[in-house]
Image (spheres, rainbow, N blue to C red):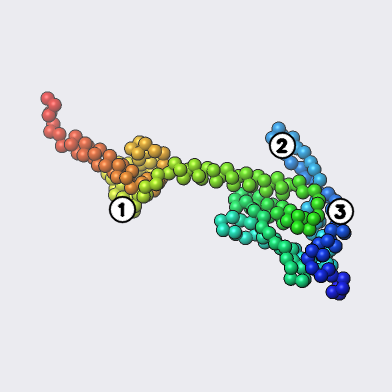
Amino acid sequence: MTTETVPAGINAALADLQTQLPHIAKNNRAEVPTKSGGKYTYQYADLAEISRQLLPLLGKLGLSFTSRPTMAGEQLVLVYELRHISGEMIEGMYPLPGRGTPQEVGSAVTYARRYCLCAVTGLAPDNDDEDAVLAEAAARRQKVERVEEKLAAQQQPQEPRINAEQLKDMQALFVSAGLDEKAEKLDYAVAVVKRKVKSATELTQAEADQVMASLRRAAEKRAEKVAEPVGADQ
C-alpha cells in the first residue's frame, strides 16, 4: 500500500469507504421461542461476517477499528475508535448493561461492537438478531433491579446498625431465654420491632435495644415466677 492510494485524512477515507461498502447477506438463522410455546425465525448477519468483509476495506484506506469494554464512572460502556494513519480519530462510547448472565453481557458487548462498527462507517446490515434481544433483556433486568434496590433502600432505616457488642449481648439473652434456633430468634425480633428483617445484623441499634429490653423483661418475669413461695395463692 503506497501513500498515494490512501486518502489524506479520515473524512476523505470515510468518503472513499462509503462508495464501496459491501452488501452483507443475512446468512445466519435464529429461532426465538414465544410465550405461547411457539417460535419464530429470522435471518441476520453476525459480527464475524461483517468484520470479514468490512475490515479489509478499512485497512486499504488506512483505517482501523478498535473497541473495548471499560468503566466510565459507574457505567459499563464499550469504548470504540475509528483511527486513520494520519492520526485523526473518531471515538465514542456505547452503554452496556452492568448486570445479567455472562451470556447476556457477552451478547450485549457483541451487539455493541457491531452496532458501533456499522454506525461509525455507515454500513447498514440487518441488526435485529439474537444479540439485540439478549442485550435488551439485560438492560430491562438492570433497570428493574435498580428500581428494586432503590425501593429497598428507601424502606431500610437510616439509623446506625447494630454493633458487635449489642449483637453479642443479644445472643446471650436469646440463649438464656431458651431460644437456640435462628428462626426462633428472628421471629422474636420481628415481633418486637414490628419490621421484617432477614438477620439480626439488619436491626438498628435502637431496635437491638428494644429486643434486649424485651428479653430482659421476659427473664425478670420468669425469675419472679420461680421465686414465688409455694402456696402463695392459697
Q: Secondary structure at mark 3?
A: loop
Tag 3 near tag 1, CB within 8 Å: no
Front residue of 134/177: it is 134
- Name the spot of residue 147 as percent of width and height, x first: 54, 43
Residue 189 at least partly seen: yes
The kind of residue tagged 3 is: His
Q: Which residue is mark 2?
A: 34
The mark tally for this picture is 3
Mark 2 neighbour density, 10 Å: few (under 14) some (14–19) many (20 or more): few
Horizontally, residue 63 falls left or right of residue 101, namely right
The image quadrant that residue 34 belongs to is: top right
Q: Which residue is mark 1?
A: 165
Residue shown at 55%/46% (left/top)? 146
Q: Secondary structure at mark 2?
A: loop
Q: Which residue is mark 3?
A: 23
Nearest to viewer (mark 3 / mark 1): 3
Horizontally, residue 113 falls left or right of residue 207, namely right
Tag 3 near tag 2, CB within 8 Å: no
The kind of residue tagged 2 is: Thr
Horizontally, residue 122 falls left or right of residue 106, namely right
Residue 60's place in the image compared with 227, above or below, is below
Residue shown at 33%/37% (left/top)? 192
Residue 187 at least partly seen: no
Q: Secondary structure at mark 1?
A: helix
- Name the spot of residue 153 as percent of width and height, x first: 46, 45
Identity of the residue furthest to the bottom in this view: 2
Residue shown at 32%/45% (left/top)? 206
Identify the disc placed on residue 105.
none
- Name the spot of residue 7 as percent of width and height, x first: 83, 68
| Sequence-first disc among 3 and 1 | 3
The kind of residue tagged 1 is: Glu
